Amino acid sequence: MADAASSGKSGKVVIRNIGLLLSGDLDRPILDADTVVIHDGVISAVGKEADCDTGGADTLIDARRTCLAPGLIDSHVHPVFGDWTPRQGQIGWIDSTMHGGVTTMISAGEVHLPGRPKDITGLKALAITAQRAFDNFRPGGVKVLAGAPVIERGMVEQDFKDLADAGVKLLGEVGLGSVKAGEEAKTMVAWARKHGIQSTIHTGGPSIPGSGLIDKDVVLEADADVIGHINGGHTALPLRDVCELCERSSRAIEIVHNGNERVAVEAARAALHLKCPHRVILGTDGPAGSGVQPLGILRMIALLSSLGGIPAEQVFCFATGNTARMRRLNCGLVEVGRDADFVFLDRAQHSAGRTLLESVQLGDIPGVGMVMIDGIVRCGRSRNTPPATEIPVVVTGAH
């Protein structure tokens, strides 16, 4: 099992010779910059090397003209405890996903825990325990925002206040528990929102035996903050209903790997047509029956860019800055004051694309050359992606 993240600070880190700097910001997805400076895990400068204070670095990284992007954010995962998933009997799935460029994961409910308690006292206790456990343990350095209770009938407003007071900030997928009616869900979502807890609703057909259909009318009435896996998890609603959700709701449009691929593409296109691409966020919805997908977010980026006809630099924003803003996170964007969570990318060796962005738009997964979390290098060349054509190197400092 992967060790928890280092408790030490990064010190001053200088990243120079960046060939392509993706910002994570849809309004300006590519920055005219080649240098990033970090102090103790936080970005302190972004710009041209001549304009940045690069002296006295504890760590100097030569990006070797590769691409630097914000670390990818998986908006929809189902962790349990530690780096283990009983759903697939697999250990190390979070660390493995970090090798796919993911630096932050957001729980949509710890639903795979064997014997998961469904009484109100038990579900609150599980959520608080999961929140505390992942706050203290970061597999591979990945920030796992966990503790997402699945709401059940009988809960009252005080239960949501208790959860919020204990540090819980998320609800698990509405609809995975006994609360499935729109009116009942709407009341509890409003209680959660009042106390600063963000909600996600299951969308589409049942995901596993015991779950049920959540149709467009329930999604609209519940008005959760995130329309979870709008392309189904796995079974999607009819495309006309998906488009109606994009049009009538103002909430986040979450597209996941473990869903209907055709509807994923159409949902992204609908968001662009409605001029609301800032609402699109990406997740994997794993671990699941289809397994663990360490490259799930990169695969979604390549899918939406190549088949959806969306520029790759924009799709990267779906998995970074869009999610950070929707989820109120201090990462996902390359700007001063944000956490220094980065993935270094380059075109896969022998890709038909001449550049990283062109290769992604052709449907190829890029190669990960390095992952950094809080200014600390967590891995070099990925063990999971195709080999990157070029990789950054640590010139000075501990690797």
Image (cartoon, rainbow, N blue to C red):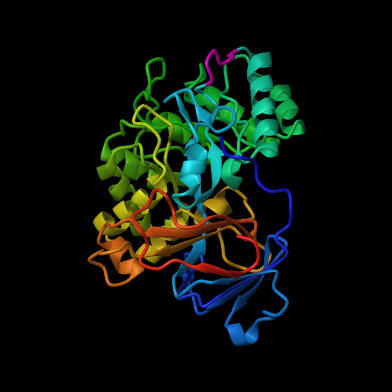
Quarter of image, res 387: bottom left
Nearer to us in this view, 398 or 187: 398
How far across and down, in percent of the image, does residue 236 sit?
31, 34
Quarter of image, res 390: bottom left
Quadrant location of the N terminus in the rendered image: top right
Seen at 40% across and 32% down, the residue is 203
Nearer to us in this view, 14 or 218: 14
SS majority, magenta: loop
Nearer to us in this view, 226 or 307: 307
Q: Magenta includes 40?
A: no
Name of the residue lying farthest toward the left: 352
Q: Is residue 290 above or below residue 336?
A: above
Q: Is residue 47 visible?
A: yes
How far across and down, in percent of the image, does residue 253 sit?
43, 46
How far across and down, in percent of the image, does residue 361 sit?
29, 62
Seen at 55% across and 40% down, the residue is 106
Instruction: Tell me the magenta residue range.
Output: 113-118
Q: Is residue 75 visible?
A: no
Q: Is residue 175 above or below residue 3?
A: above
Nearer to us in this view, 239 or 283: 283
